[in-house]
Amino acid sequence: MISTRTPRFIVAAVLSSGLMFSLPAQATPEQDQALAATVKAALLQATPFQHKGVDLQVRALDGAVNVSGWVTHANHPRLAAAIASEVSGVQRVTTNLHTWSSRDDIRR
């Protein structure tokens, strides 16, 4: 912890050296595409995502992955996030998944 007595030049030296903070490395477009493809392959290996009603799109940018599309069950967005987060290189996962339903599935 930096106290109020710490000389400013020491704080500046520590900050500029990157010891306290480091900027995340930017991935190339090819690396982003490869990560998205790896995540999608991992998702499609899971039985719930092999259903014909599933339509997934995966995008990656610098380790942040977004999974969007349509799934068949309300718990599938959480499952997709859990699977995607286990893929090497994934730093953060967001989902924008919608659930298909039919009149038979609607509970009143």
Image (cartoon, rainbow, N blue to C red):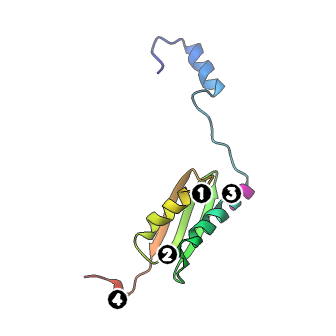
Residue at 50 percent across and 61 percent down: it is: 81
User: What amino acid is found at the position of numbered circle 3 in the picture?
Assistant: Asp
Q: Residue furthest left?
A: 108
| Quadrant holding the C terminus | bottom left
Residue at 61 percent across and 26 percent down: it is: 19
Labelled pair 2, 3 in contact (Cβ < 8 Å): no
In the displayed structure, 95 sits above or below 16; it is below
Residue at which label 3 appears:
32
- Tag 2, which secondary structure? helix
Sequence-earlier tag: 2 or 3:
3
- Tag 4, which secondary structure? helix
Residue at which label 4 appears:
104
Please state the horizontal and vertical placement of residue 5, each as a whole percent of the image.
Answer: 47, 11
User: What amino acid is found at the position of numbered circle 1 in the picture?
Assistant: Val
Q: CA distance from mark 1 to mark 2?
A: 18 Å
Sequence-earlier tag: 4 or 3:
3
Span colored in magenta = 29-33
Labelled pair 1, 2 in contact (Cβ < 8 Å): no
Image quadrant in which you'd find residue 33: bottom right
Number of other residues with Cα within 10 Å of mark 2, as a class: few under 14, some 14 to 19, many 20 or more: some
User: What amino acid is found at the position of numbered circle 2 in the picture?
Assistant: Pro
Residue at which label 1 appears:
87
Main secondary structure of the magenta stretch: helix
Q: CA distance from mark 4 to mark 2?
A: 19 Å
In the displayed structure, 48 sits above or below 103; it is above
